[in-house]
Image: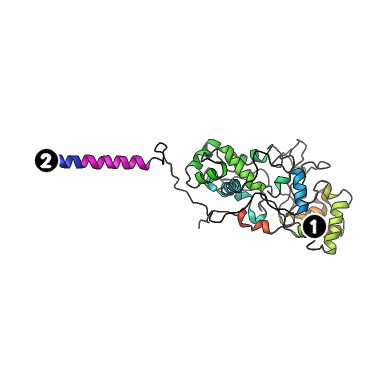
Amino acid sequence: MHTQTHHSQARHLLICCLLVGLSMSACTTNGTTPIVTNPNEVAPNLSTTYTYANTTFPKHIADALAQVDNTPSNNPITDAGATLGRVLFYDTQLSKNNTISCGSCHKQELSFTDDAIKSKGFQGGLTARHSMPLLSVRFYQSGKMFWDERAATLEAQVLMPIQDEVEMGMTLPELEQRLATLSYYPSLFQKAFGSTAITSERVALALAQFVRAIVPYQSKYDRVKQGLESFTTSEARGEQLFTNGRDACSSCHPPPMFITSNPARPFGLPNTGDNGADGRGNFKSPSLRNTAERTALFHNGSIADIEQMFNGRIREHGVAGGGRADLTAFLRTLTDNTIKTDPKFSNPFPSVK
């Protein structure tokens, strides 16, 4: 009798312990919120910290930035914010089936654009336009984003591909729920915003900080402007043509970042079915930095490279005779190779083989 009672008590104690253990395993440290884990989690490597805030730009770039910076007062670049943005930028968990990230269509090694004319989305569908390069977007004074400028700010733009039915296929509630299942995000949000709350608004702020930090300033052109190097004869002639020639290129692409949100005259590239930014076939002009290495130009990727552009495929960009070689030589001085390899802009997630 006593033995049966002892066994019954032991079983009761074991069951209680198991229930307590299960209860504890389903709670966070405050004992109230269930932990949801993500079996697809692959944590980023953030063992090295990088500086994004208060970059010391050469004077010719710093002076220009002071005039056109589209950074809003409520979202300055911080090291913690941009670090979170970097993780978000490369995290495939931001797409419906965990296959596509922002970095899938804006590849660092390609100056944050794509070599495909149209990029593939999460189910293999193709984007409507060519991937716009993300260099120097901080210098686009109006702050309007996309080829057709449909996003009023960079903060608005960064959430739109995530919700696009072709690109990443998520809703914002789904995005917040997904990120909450990943163990590495609470501390990143805590460092960036002072609490672990994961919201789509904070996702937008962090992504915008990271993208604004992508500023090329270490090209030959920049070294020349600092008196550290000299143009070749051909490069110097090209700069003169670019700046002072008839219908000078610089009227729509002013130095030193070769970007403006208020070009001197509209430019149109006819494209059936695509009416652009103003309903008349005009499109945003991105920075010409690193353009000499791109293999698909303009919103539809219809021009293969700068040589083809100068050969008259587009009337407004045609260049006669020897001027083509000189302009090409000059544009090549705008290439900043460091931006394509700088680890602070690289993918922090280990490659899955």
| Secondary structure state at the residue bearing disc 2 | helix
Q: Is residue 104 left or right of residue 260?
A: left
Q: Are marks 2 and 1 in contact (CB under 8 Å)?
A: no
Residue 65 in the image, given as x and y percentages of width and height = 75, 47
**Scheme of image coloration:** rainbow
Left or right: residue 59 compared with residue 338: right
Mark 1, Cα crowd under 10 Å, few <14 / some 14-19 / many 20+, is some
**In x, y percent, where is residue 4?**
13, 41
Q: Identify which residue, 102 or 346, lies in the foreground.
A: 346
In the figure, 225 relative to 120: above or below? below
Q: The residue under label 1 is which amino acid type?
A: Lys
Of residues 56 and 271, the one nearer the viewer is: 56
Does residue 28 show up magenta in the picture?
A: yes
Q: Specify start and end residues of the magenta stretch as a single range.
A: 11-36
Please provide percent x and percent y for residue 53: 65, 49
> For the residue marked with disc 2, what is the amino acid?
His
Label 2 crowd (10 A; few <14 / some 14-19 / many >=20): few
Q: Residue at x 84, y 46 (%)?
A: 251
Q: Nearer the viewer, residue 256 or 227?
A: 227
Label placed on residue 225: 1
The span from disc 2 to disc 1 (Cα, nearest Å) is 94 Å
Q: Which mark is residue 2?
A: 2
- What percent of the width, then of the height, locates residue 44? 52, 52
Label 2 or label 1, whichever comes before in sequence order: 2
Q: Residue furthest left?
A: 1
In the visual, does 228 lie left or right of 90?
right
Q: Is residue 136 visible?
A: yes
